[in-house]
Image (cartoon, grey):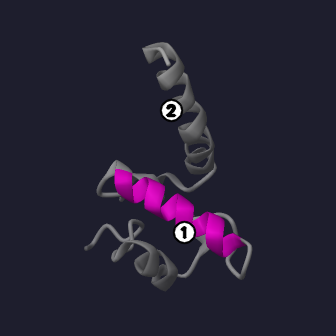
Amino acid sequence: MTALQLLKRSYDNVQPIIFWYDVQNVALSDGLKSPKDAIRLYNYAHRKSKQHLPELADTWPAKERIKALGYDPMNTNE
């Protein structure tokens, strides 16, 4: 596999995450501590949206974001 093919595959994997954050409140993404946390929250949302949570994490109760990450990225006082 060429470097360009690997890059495209990586982009294809990340594109849904980028789109998901584009429709969230900007405070959510601004409060994330790392890119890894962005992926963790997206994966948590994807699993939980099929159960009981709305798809958009910025509408969740803070306790759900804390359960996913150990902190609330929308609470800038932390």
Residue 44's disc number: 1
Please, what is the three-letter code of the amino acid marked with disc 2?
Ser
Q: Describe the element under mark 2 as helix, strand or loop.
A: helix
Residue 9 image offset from top left, x and y in percent: 56, 29
Say if 51 sits above or below 28 in the image: below
Crowding near pointer 2: few (<14 within 10 Å), some, many (20+)? Answer: few
Residue at (63%, 43%) from the top-left corner?
16
Give percent across and percent down for residue 46.
64, 64
Per the image, is 32 magenta?
Answer: no
Quadrant for residue 50, please give it: bottom right
Q: Tell me which segment is drawn in magenta.
A: 36-49
Instruction: Farthest residue to the left: give it.
Output: 78
C-alpha separation, residue under disc 2 versus residue under disc 1:
20 Å
Q: Is residue 27 above or below residue 76?
A: above
Q: Nearer the viewer, mark 2 or mark 1?
A: 2
Q: Which residue has dot 2 on it?
A: 10
| Residue lying at 48% horizontally and 23% vertically, measured from the top left | 7
Q: Amino acid at mark 1?
A: Tyr
Asked whether 53 or 58 is in front, the reply is 53
Task: Give the x, y percent position of residue 73.
Answer: 38, 66
Q: Nearer the viewer, residue 20 or 1?
A: 1
Q: Quick one: SS at disc 1?
A: helix
Q: Is residue 47 magenta?
A: yes
